[in-house]
């Protein structure tokens, strides 16, 4: 099969290329319906991953339709709507391992069925697991933060405080269930959180900003004695962090990345079922769509966050 793909050939340089795609046992060809832009892709796009060989095709948050089945008959048949753990999805088609393909329910829009980030959110929500009456603080209202907020809004937490520096994202956080908003550019976030929690701090803090400032705020607003600090963000640049507040408070620190999940594919399946009930607010979080020829434009917008950008979606077969 002849396919087209967007290749990263150098920092901030992408080219559209064609090649033949064939599969062997254990794989199926999936026609990509949609693929989300992820901040780990941005990290590679900017040249911050010197160990990554170029050229490379980015994209791992995809959904699609099986068009050619495994030669040995294993895996889903052609026509099956799927998502799952496959990569190199900034392309019209991809060879996907059949054991990682997960069917998408018929009533879930394909553009919403981005299995990898959905599974990540389920993983974080299960790790957070706020108890009745807990105060929860979520730092960073990007796409993943907002999706997690939407998932946890129906939890037992007494309050959910959303912290960000963009007013538009905080307004959306309010719509998705945040009970309190803090614009860290305009307000002393530490003081506001400590005042609101009567000086005790929060039982659950989720740090999605990926910045040293966000981590330091999280470390200093966690409640004394066995509270939870979840760090699902990717802190990709070397930095210095003060860990003393965490040690002093006896904080449980959980790096809630995919490796923390006991069964990431099961988290994905659970997430697809939650999508059917309207969780994750995908229609509000997915703000921009790009064709394959616009792949680099989408990456640049993910870098800058311009024009109200929250999360972009590549639609290569549009």
Image (tube, rainbow, N blue to C red):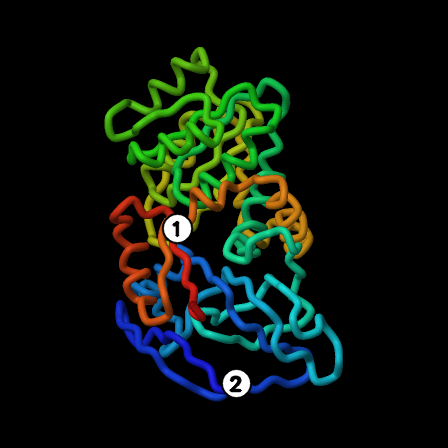
Where disc 1 sits, the SS reads strand
Q: Please tell me which of labels 2 and 1 falls first in the chain.
A: 2
**Horizontal arrangement in the rendering, residue 10 relative to residue 291 (left or right):** left
Q: Which residue is mark 2?
A: 21
Across and down, in percent, residue 284 comes to 43, 42
Across and down, in percent, residue 144 comes to 46, 45
Where disc 2 sits, the SS reads loop
Residue at 72%, 72% in the rendered image: 75
Q: How many angstroms separate mark 2 from mark 1 (CA)? A: 29 Å
Q: Nearer the viewer, residue 182 or 23?
A: 23
Across and down, in percent, residue 9 comes to 31, 77
Residue at 53%, 31% in the rendered image: 251
**Horizontal arrangement in the rendering, residue 315 relative to residue 182 (left or right):** right
Q: Nearer the viewer, residue 246 or 142?
A: 142
Across and down, in percent, residue 62 comes to 52, 62
Q: Which quadrant holds residue 96?
A: bottom right
Are discs 2 and 1 less than 8 Å apart at CB? no
Q: Nearer the viewer, residue 287 or 117?
A: 287
**Label 2: few (<14), some (14–19) or many (≥20) C-alpha neighbours in 10 Å:** few
User: Which quarter of the rendering shows the C terminus?
Assistant: bottom left
**Label 1: few (<14), some (14–19) or many (≥20) C-alpha neighbours in 10 Å:** many
270 in relation to 81, above or below: above
Residue at 34%, 52% in the rendered image: 238
The image's mark for residue 311 is: 1
């Amino acid at each position: 099969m002849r396919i087209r793909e967007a290749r990263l050939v150098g920092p901030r340089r992408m080219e559209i290329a064609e090649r033949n795609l064939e599969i062997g046992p254990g794989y199926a060809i999936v026609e990509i319906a949609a693929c989300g832009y992820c901040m780990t892709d941005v990290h590679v796009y900017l040249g911050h991953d010197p160990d990554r060989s170029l050229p490379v095709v980015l994209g791992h948050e995809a959904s699609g339709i099986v068009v050619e089945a495994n030669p040995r008959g294993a895996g889903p048949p052609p026509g099956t709507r799927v998502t799952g753990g496959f990569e190199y999805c900034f392309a019209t088609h991809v060879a996907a391992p059949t054991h990682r393909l997960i069917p998408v329910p018929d009533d879930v829009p394909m553009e919403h069925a981005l299995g990898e980030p959905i599974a990540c959110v389920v993983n974080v929500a299960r790790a957070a697991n706020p108890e009745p009456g807990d105060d929860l603080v979520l730092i960073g209202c990007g796409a993943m933060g907002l999706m997690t907020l939407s998932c946890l809004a129906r939890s037992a937490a007494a309050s959910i405080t959303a912290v960000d520096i963009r007013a538009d994202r905080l307004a959306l956080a309010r719509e998705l269930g945040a009970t309190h908003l803090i614009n860290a550019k305009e307000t002393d976030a530490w003081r506001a959180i400590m005042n609101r929690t009567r000086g005790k701090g929060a039982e659950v803090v989720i740090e999605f900003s990926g910045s040293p400032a966000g981590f330091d705020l999280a470390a200093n607003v966690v409640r004394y004695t066995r509270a939870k600090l979840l760090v699902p963000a990717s802190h990709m640049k070397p930095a210095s962090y003060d860990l003393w507040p965490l040690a002093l408070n006896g904080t449980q620190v959980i790096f809630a990345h995919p490796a923390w999940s006991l069964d990431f594919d099961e988290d994905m399946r659970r997430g697809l079922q939650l999508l059917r009930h309207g969780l994750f607010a995908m229609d509000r979080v997915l703000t921009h769509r790009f064709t394959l020829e616009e792949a680099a434009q989408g990456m640049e917008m993910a870098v800058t966050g311009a024009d109200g950008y929250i999360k972009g979606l590549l639609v290569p077969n549009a």
